[in-house]
Image (spheres, rainbow, N blue to C red):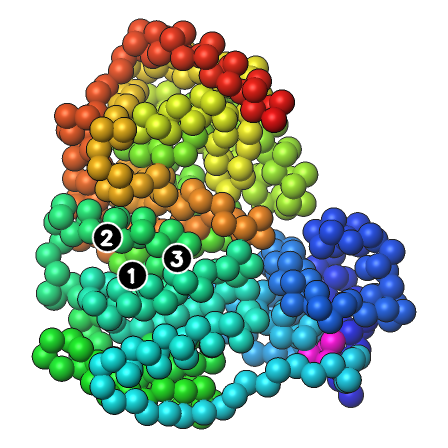
Amino acid sequence: MDSTYADTLKQLIGLADIKLFIVANTLGYDISYISKWCNGAKLPSVKMISSIHQQLSRLLAKSILEQNLSLAFYSMFDLTSPVHRSSTSLNSLEADIIKILNAAYKTSAPHVVFQEKNDYLKYAVGHHVIFSELRQSIQQAISEIHDTTIHIWTSLDLFSNNATFLLQILQSNVSMNRRLLLHIGFNLSKQLINLDSIHKIVELLSQHPEINIELYDNSSFNCLNFILINDYFFANFTTDENDNIQMMSYGTRQSILSQLSKYVLPFFSSTHLILELKDSYNIASTNFRTSFYAATDFIFLCNYGFEYLLPSSIVKEIADYSFEQTGSRTDATEIQKLQITWEEVFEKANLKFIIPKSALFEYFEKSEILYCSTHYKLSQKQQQMHINYIIQCMRTNPNIHLYIFDDFNVRAGRYKKIFNMYFNQFQFYIKNVLYPSESYSSMLTILKHPSFLKAFSDFLQDIIDSPHCQEYNVEQMVKISRKYGRMFTRLQKINERL
């Protein structure tokens, strides 16, 4: 017999070892409501059930992964662990929790009618007809999928016209309540890896910041032409010599989806990865950041705030704040470990910080930073301590170089302030600094293909060598602090009163 909603909810909360008051705070409900859901006295509102399950699944999945209980979860509910990834991801665990909660809700409220998936297979011929059908079908599929993360897998090349069309469709379906993850191709056998191609990649990523893009070498895809959306929708098509789609089969028929998925998903293996997406939360439970800072030469592009060279006392307050906001010790522990690493490494390392002038002004005015995945607003006192400590560090380590890039004099769009970039001699990654939803931590895009490393290094050096970029020594930084400090302090006070 299927479990009731109350039993299922209690099992999940018990496994995750989360207090009811944390569940209540996360969902924005009084704790008495949560208690009634758990003892079966009441069910959540049908109108709000989708939102409740999305938020609850994120909270539960985080705690389960933190405690390495994913296998216990799949065993408890007699489920098969995901096979397309080497380990259970936060996104896949969230999706499975939502399915379990939805099924339990349906058991306890059999009168509630859940919209069933429309199982169909269709064909379309002709470029214009196909584009119209594809737009409508993808929009419908995304609107009907209740998962908090939607994966789109495609053989299309990132710079192709068809990929541009797909990105336009996805951009029009961006939602604050879910993530779109696009897994797309880049043909290494046809594309040159140089400064120009890196500029094109960065610009394209910047044009679609709400779409998280993971890049694969698709040179082995041969004549495959497909789009897959979760386990819900597929499109398979033929193209002419101009890459125009001429014929397409598409639909939601599960038997075809299953066969197509088994055949094409292995092409998206780690061996073909160029740019890999990682959730900051998942990164926090690894040693990725600490190993990254084991190098001796770094270049950073800081488009949002300036999280480096903070006094340890402020870092401790950020860690405490992170724990208060999320209830997760993983993020707080990573913040403190990272600070220790920085203190040891940055004392002698060669450091180049590139800061757009507009980003510097925003930091002075708003005092906001993104430390790991924690958004934090410094007080006026903390900001002054930060500035003083930066100057102190520059005096101590002459290998710290600060470059201010005058983006006010550069065409808007080329250097959109979407990403922070991090480079050492061996690794490169970027962090999306937008904050699309309080339900999600920031995404990292990690370079996995070594052939791109020099090109990304050249990209950052190209900014430094630009006539719009100027290096500032410690005495010049003192003057900047004095020149703008008082003005932005007054602006901060105005913002606080508004």
Write the residue at 35% across / 54% down.
208
Question: Is tag 2's residue or tag 3's residue first in the polypeptide sequence?
Answer: 2
What segment carries the magenta color? 103-107
Q: Residue at x 50, y 25 (%)?
A: 367
- Circle 1 residue: 215
Quadrant including the C terminus: top right
Q: Mark 3 sits on what residue? A: 212
Q: Which residue is mark 2?
A: 201
Residue 262 point in image, percent of width and height: 38, 84
Task: Determine the CA span between mark 1 and mark 3.
Answer: 10 Å
Is 435 located above or below residue 74 in the figure? above
Q: Which amino acid type corresponds to the residue marked 2 in the rendered image?
A: Ile
At mark 2, the secondary structure is helix
Q: Nearer the viewer, residue 115 or 225?
A: 115
As drawn, 195 above or below 181: above
Residue 23 on image: x %, y %: 74, 54
Q: Amino acid at mark 3?
A: Asn
